[in-house]
Image: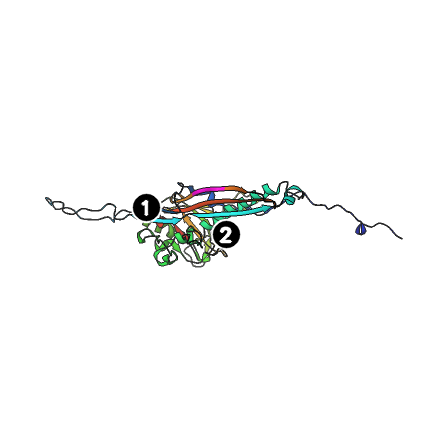
Amino acid sequence: MAGLFEINQVAKREDLLDLLTRVDEKATPFMSLVNKGATPRNTYIEWPVDNYDAPQLGGVVDGTDVSTYGNPAENRALLSSYLQTFRKTAKVSRLAQDVSDVAGVSDEIAEAIAKVGVELLRNIESTCLSDQEHQADDGTNPYLLRGLGVWIRNTANIGVQTSHQVPADYRPAAGQYVVTGTAALTETSIQSVLQSIWSSTGMMGDYKLFCDATLRRAFTDFTRTIATAGYSSRNFDFAGDAKKVSNSTTIFEGDFGTVEVIANNFIGYNSAGTSQTAGRGYLLDMDKIDMRMNKNPTVERFEDQGGGERFMIEARTALQVRNPIGLAQFNP
């Protein structure tokens, strides 16, 4: 017997929820915490560094006249880098903007501007935390800034600085460039890094450790080892009726400073920006790092020549590491 069945119905309305869900919530903590430095007035920026002479023992024979004079500026040097332009573009056709009724999007142009703005910020964050070496614009290749993966290099690994190398007196010590595999890191390893910074600078400050998930987990998994061979323990304090156990290390207090551990999704890209190094981390004194913006992210609209709204978001910035001798890198 003939009849109407759901499978054969014509002109059924589409049940499309008016909601656009984007689950990617990766933050840009470095951009949020870095100092905003002075506005660059040139594509090539420089800044001076200085150091004290090593202490000297001894005295002066009574009655000795002064015959030689020191140069108090003899330790001065210049560090430098370049201003990089970051840009994201988009185009929305007239029909896409004025006619289409898209679920979860009331204004395609506004949605596009908001999305590419976040993407631009992530590009800047990834570049600053990368292994990109700076370069000058030669008419074919653009200006590039130097990422922290290249800034924080000891003498043995300085070769990646292919132009304007940091002078030897201002490079991190060997103990501040850690190549130990993440699984082998211990609390003693971190203490040694902090001690190396203190030995070089005398600083016992508050540090930020920007790190990937692998290195972040290493801090949580640290254990206190008892002298008995093969035995280790870790104590947890929790309320017996709370029905939960907290196991997380956000603040590490060492003998030579305090470290706040901050997970970052955009750290450790190689110079090509195609892959990330697992276990990468930068131990930073944020007072020694500046983001020098020549142009904050700005939306610029272009003439609609008939095809629809065209626009770009552009920013120009340089990363200034005032003195890398007080920083450290984990690069297994």
Q: Residues within 10 Å of mark 1 (few under 14, many from 20)?
A: few
Say what amino acid the circle numbered 1 marks.
Answer: Pro
Looking at the image, is 228 positioned above or below residue 89? below
Using the rendered image of the protein, determine whether residue 252 is visible from the camera's viewpoint.
Answer: no
Q: Position of residue 221 (x, y in %)?
A: 48, 52
Q: Is residue 147 magenta?
A: no
Q: Position of residue 200 (x, y in %)?
A: 32, 50
| Element class at badge 2 | helix
Query: Does residue 119 appear to the left or right of 327 in the view shown?
Result: right
Say what amino acid the circle numbered 2 marks.
Answer: Ala
- Locate residue 154: give its quadrant: bottom left
Q: Are marks 2 and 1 in contact (CB under 8 Å)?
A: no
Q: In terms of depth relative to the viewer, which is nearer, 79 or 136?
A: 136
Q: Which residue: 50% across, 49% down? A: 123
User: Any mark on residue 274, and which?
Assistant: none
Q: Is residue 296 magenta?
A: yes
| Element class at badge 1 | strand
- Locate residue 109: give its quadrant: top right
Q: Which residue: 46% across, 57% down? A: 183
Q: Which secondary structure class fits the magenta region best?
A: strand
User: Which residues are the magenta region?
Assistant: 293-297
Q: In terms of depth relative to the viewer, which is nearer, 125 or 235?
A: 125
User: Any mark on residue 213, and which?
Assistant: 2
Badge 2 or badge 1: first in the primary sequence: 1
Q: Position of residue 289 (x, y in %)?
A: 40, 45
Q: Which residue is mark 1?
A: 48
Using the rendered image of the protein, determine whether residue 181 is visible from the camera's viewpoint.
Answer: yes
Q: Residue furthest right?
A: 1
Q: Residues within 10 Å of mark 2 (few under 14, many from 20)?
A: some
Say which of marks 2 and 1 sits in front: 1
| Inter-mark Cα distance, 2 to 1 | 35 Å
